[in-house]
Image (cartoon, rainbow, N blue to C red):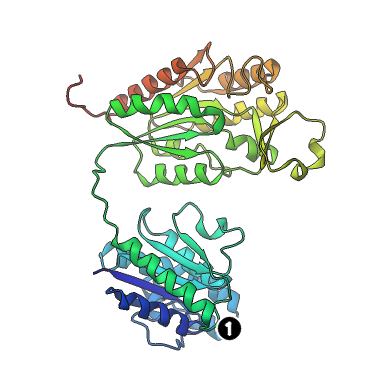
Amino acid sequence: MATIAVLGTLDTKGAEHGFVAGEIRRQGHTVILIDVGTSGRPSIVPDICADEVAAIAGFDMQPLRERGDRGECVAAMAAVAPAVLLKLCREQKIDGVISLGGSSGTAIASSAMRALPTGFPKLIVSTMASGNIAPYVGTSDILMMPAIVDVAGLNRISRMIFARAAGAICGMVSVRLHESDSSPVIAASMFGNTTECINAAIPLLEQAGYEVLVFHANGSGGRTMESLIESGLIQGVLDVTTTELADELVGGVLTAGPDRLTAAARCGVPAVVAPGCLDMVNFGEPRSIPSRFADRRFYAHNPQVTLMRTNAEECRTLGEQVAGKVNASIGPVSVLIPLRGVSLISAAGGPFHDAGADAALFSSLTSSLRPGIRTLALDLTINSREFAEACVRELLAGIAAAGRSITVEGQP
């Protein structure tokens, strides 16, 4: 039997959360009802009231209620709600959490759930789930389930959706992983155009005793990788796909924001960095590309993704940016440059081959690195096995230099 937190705005959606709580109890689990409503007047009796939620975070909601600004109250509750879930999780009093809501309820619940560890079961039934959920999910593993109808009463549709959601969270908390998770972890960034490099590196790292987590460099993947590095989970970083920086600079759709390529440097985590896929900026289908790029070189990666070749000026700036981020490293770091192509399609004969743009990238990168940064310019393409092997050698050496290496039985 598990204990599941049912967290929501019980002042406006008490009956709905009460229904979910009942369904969870019918499946043999215990419920902790948590009110995060802004009025402080729940329509059903919670186990933890809204004022208690605020008090755990050292906050008093009453002055805000008296001002009567609902938006201000929602923002405040979203800020304090993480504390109650973190406390219950750390005290091992809950095994999962579920919530129902519209935009405000989803904002509060998702803020609370984002504070929980990766892998902790968390589910939100939301009217916002069919749109852009990135602001709610962030880099977490929150499961968002469309509400179909508004979370406003119980009817033949909402009962069905809420009951299925209750079943889903019960199933999630019932799963027990039996595999060992004791291996130290390497984070690696990958794109379709650097897949061969990472696929060659993974078995080499696994043979050395590491588990490899691969992150798709699609914006959310880069942000997630950065947050996990900062959390202390990662022992080494194989960041060969820094393409999200190009989207951030030029205005593509897969940017990971300005903090990409900063966590390992700031935290002293050993890293290998390469300018992988800095030859491209990502857009959607062709008609979605801004008209100011009409004269640029494009490549159809698939029907939904169109790539645009970065030019020499952009590459020069990207080289400086990568160097600036790497220069901030307080731990071991190596920069490896694949002189024959930074992606599958930029090698000689490929649709994005541009020797002048590559030269601008490599020159600005190497000239902007501070003394002491180990730099290897290799006469290889990024997807060659030899380049992958060089990356692995450098990363393992950096990990050893930082005193983080492990001994694998049967190996020196």
| Residue at 41% across, 45% down | 228
Q: Quadrant of the N terminus?
A: bottom left
Residue 253 lies, with reference to residue 196, above or below; the image says below
Residue 66: % across, % down: 54, 86
How crowded pointer 1 is (Cα within 10 Å; few <14, some 14-19, many 20+) is rated as: few
Q: Nearer the viewer, residue 351 or 359?
A: 351
Could one spot residue 246 in this view of the protein? yes
Residue 25: % across, % down: 31, 77
Indicate the secondary structure of the residue bearing disc 1: helix
Q: Which residue is mark 1?
A: 67
Q: Nearer the viewer, residue 398 or 355?
A: 355
Residue 149: % across, % down: 58, 75
| Residue at 66% across, 15% down | 349
Residue 101: % across, % down: 52, 73
Residue 264 lies, with reference to residue 15, above or below; the image says above
Q: Quadrant of the C terminus?
A: top left
Q: Nearer the viewer, residue 175 or 7?
A: 175
Query: In the drawing, does residue 142 fall left or right of residue 136?
Result: left
Query: In the drawing, does residue 231 fall left or right of residue 148?
Result: left
Q: Nearer the viewer, residue 48 or 171?
A: 171
* Extreme residue toward the top, this view: 379
* Extreme residue toward the left, this view: 410
Identified by mark 1, the residue type is: Arg
Could one spot residue 323 in this view of the protein? no
Residue 68 lies, with reference to residue 72, above or below; the image says below
| Residue at 38% across, 47% down | 231
